[in-house]
Image (tube, rainbow, N blue to C red):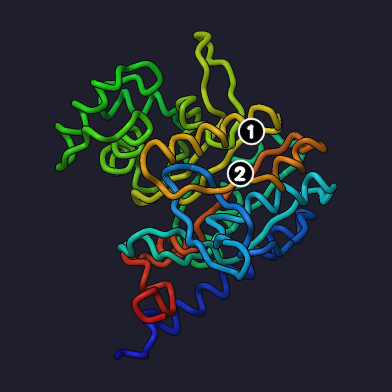
Amino acid sequence: MTWQPTTSIEALQARARLNRVIRGFFAARGVLEVETPLLCHSTATDPHLHSFAVPTGDYTCYLQTSPEFPMKRLLAAGSGPIYQLGKAFRFEETSRLHNPEFTLLEWYRPGWTLEQLVDEVEALVLDAATALGADLQPFPRFTHAEVFRQVLGLDSHSCADADLLAAARRRVNGDFASLDRNGLLDLLMSHVVEPALPETGAFVLDFPVSQAALAQKARRPDGGLVAQRAELYISGMEIANGYQELVDPAEQRDRFEADLAYRVQHGLPALPLPAFLLGAMETGLPESAGVALGVDRLLMVLTGATDIASVVGFPLQRA
């Protein structure tokens, strides 16, 4: 067995420097650092996210794919603006861009719009780039419809599922007949659209309403609905994913129940309803914008790394 870390001392020092930048950034802006449980009674219901289940005696708990649910409970309890820098877990294969255990920065801004939060994401990333000696400039902003139309000639909001499937078969190797609309949108985004975005970075805004997840919906100028969701991509990688957070408990319950029903229909592991979060939302979740940022991937961008193992001390194979 090889016991040595896969990263260098220089990369460890860069991570420490990045962590200092993050904490200093939020301290200067009056955002409170919090810690929430990694092991919880419920987890993300999204059918495209897979959690580690952990037996804990009388019941099963789950390692969190992000700290979103307990952080929103803190918001409902009156915490004000908060951030968390720590570990998250997703039950996925190890790859050049993913380790099942990873470092996530997540923060919430009560009373803010998503546009304000996008500005703050940009400010943090540019501050980090300056501190680590990387050359990044303010990022252009495109809508999801714009980038899909430019790269694939399709309107991602209104095109037929058959058009998405045909595009996937044309542009990506594999058999995708079993994918639903969201699966096809995700596949085309990750394999075709993301690589065509500016290498130096870009924000993509206004996602298809079917991909709202935990985001609010809004009207487009043409009257159609969009998800108030924004993602930052740099060097062909998704770096951050932000929402104008859904605060309606009835709609949130409906979305959770739809996810759980989809899981049953497609043979995915059954999960409990996130009752604690729904209880918090019923008490009152403030209007907020929130975002999750992948620290390992940002560190890859800032140090020029091409494999996550080179910025993570001990990836799964050596953990």
Q: Quadrant of the N terminus?
A: bottom left
Q: Secondary structure at mark 2?
A: loop
Q: Which mark is residue 253?
A: 1
> Does 206 sit left or right of 95 as displayed?
right
Does the residue at mark 2 contact the one at mark 1 (Cβ under 8 Å)? yes
Q: Quadrant of the C terminus?
A: bottom left
The residue drawn where x is 40% and y is 65% is 99
Count of numbered marks: 2
For marks 2 and 1, the one nearer the N-term is: 1
When the figure is inspected, residue 83 is found, relative to residue 273, above or below; the finding is below
The residue drawn where x is 60% and y is 49% is 123
> Does 110 sit left or right of 307 as displayed?
right
When the figure is inspected, residue 165 is found, relative to residue 9, above or below; the finding is above
Residue 133 coordinates in the image, percent (x, y) = 48, 66
Alpha carbon of mark 2 to alpha carbon of mark 1: how far?
Answer: 8 Å
Residue 115 coordinates in the image, percent (x, y) = 62, 33
Picture quarter containing residue 130? bottom right
